[in-house]
Amino acid sequence: MLCPDGLDGFNYKRFEGKGLDFDEIEDAVNTFPAFADKTMVEIHDFDLFKSDDKSLLIDLLSDLPDFVCLVFVYGTIEYKPDGRQKINKEILSHINVVDFVVQDQDKLVKWIKRHFADCGKNISTTDAEYLAFITGGLMASLNGEIEKTAAYSKNDSVIRSDIDAVVTPILDTVAYKLTDALVSRENVKALRILDELFQMREAPHKLIYSISMKMRQLLAARVCIETGADKHEFMKICGIRHEFQARILFATAGKTSLNECRDAVLSCCVTASELNSSSDPEDRITELVTKFALK
């Protein structure tokens, strides 16, 4: 284990790539581990190939201390090196690339069921799909959520209320719930979910991006319904991996009209533009959700 004390220990350092200075990376890499052999430095969404400090990065990567493991994680930005540039080729010569892909739906559901069985619990296929959906389907986070949910459940079988009681959903999932509540005319519930989004301390621009994306997917689902396209065609259009996500969007799209979906997307665009000049972006997002709720 690189971090025997877990991710809260002294020897694990995590940074977000946006706005990160090279000096911060260098300081973290050259800090000796405390009461351990190794230290782990994890940098999320830092584009190695667009950095202004490429030469310095090459010097750093070519002479990393033996006591450090430096990991660059690409989540919200694409890993896309331009191998035509000599300096990028040199960066690539100093790194090992590991691609972690999301499992397909059937394999993921079987994996979830198997891990619940190891905890002495059963779970239905539908609820296993739901758990995968609200956690983003990543095994790294699912493992802990499975153990937590199994420990919480008082019955032999885990049910959805157990999952909702203890599992922390990802931002995209909460946005799905928000759009579903709005379309279902559950206005009080929609405003409560919006409050949950604010409490998640996510940046307003990230919130409007997520809400806008769900509204665009909802419009695409409605168009597919209008034209007779099935869920699989819809999944290809929107780049959705799991069928249960498509089912949720299709069910929600079936409750609203094409014009309403179009208006929702346009309203999101207006709000996104207003956020750039607003002194209180949370108010702009609240106004958007309230506008949807009043229709």
Image (spheres, rainbow, N blue to C red):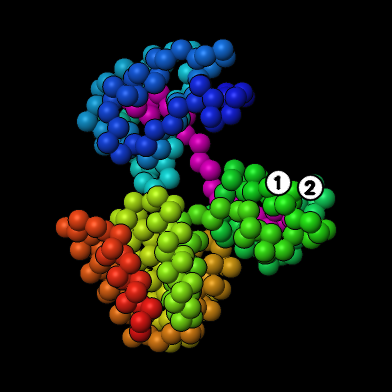
Query: Where is 35 relative to 246, above or below?
Result: above
Cβ atoms at labels 1 and 2 below 8 Å apart: yes
Residue 276 placement (x, y as % from top left):
19, 57
Q: Is residue 144 left or right of residue 279?
A: right
Q: Quadrant of residue 129?
A: bottom right
Residue 154 placement (x, y as % from top left):
79, 56
Question: In the picture, which quadrant includes the N terminus?
Answer: top right
Residue 225 placement (x, y as % from top left):
47, 84
**Where does label 1 land, which residue?**
147
Looking at the image, which is closer to me, 194 or 147?
Answer: 194
Please name the amino acid that badge 1 sits on: Glu
Q: Which mark is residue 228?
A: none
Name which of mark 1 and mark 2 comes first in the sequence. 2
Looking at the image, which is closer to me, 72 or 32?
Answer: 32
Question: In the picture, which quadrant includes the C terminus?
Answer: bottom left
Asked if the stretch drawn in magenta spans residue 103, the answer is yes
Q: Which mark is residue 119?
A: 2
Residue 191 placement (x, y as % from top left):
42, 69
Real-space Cα separation, disc 1 to disc 2, in angstroms: 7 Å
Q: What range of the chain is rendered magenta?
A: 90-114
- How crowded pointer 1 is (Cα within 10 Å; few <14, some 14-19, many 20+) is rated as some
- The secondary structure type at the circle numbered 2 is loop
Asked if the stretch drawn in magenta spans residue 34, the answer is no
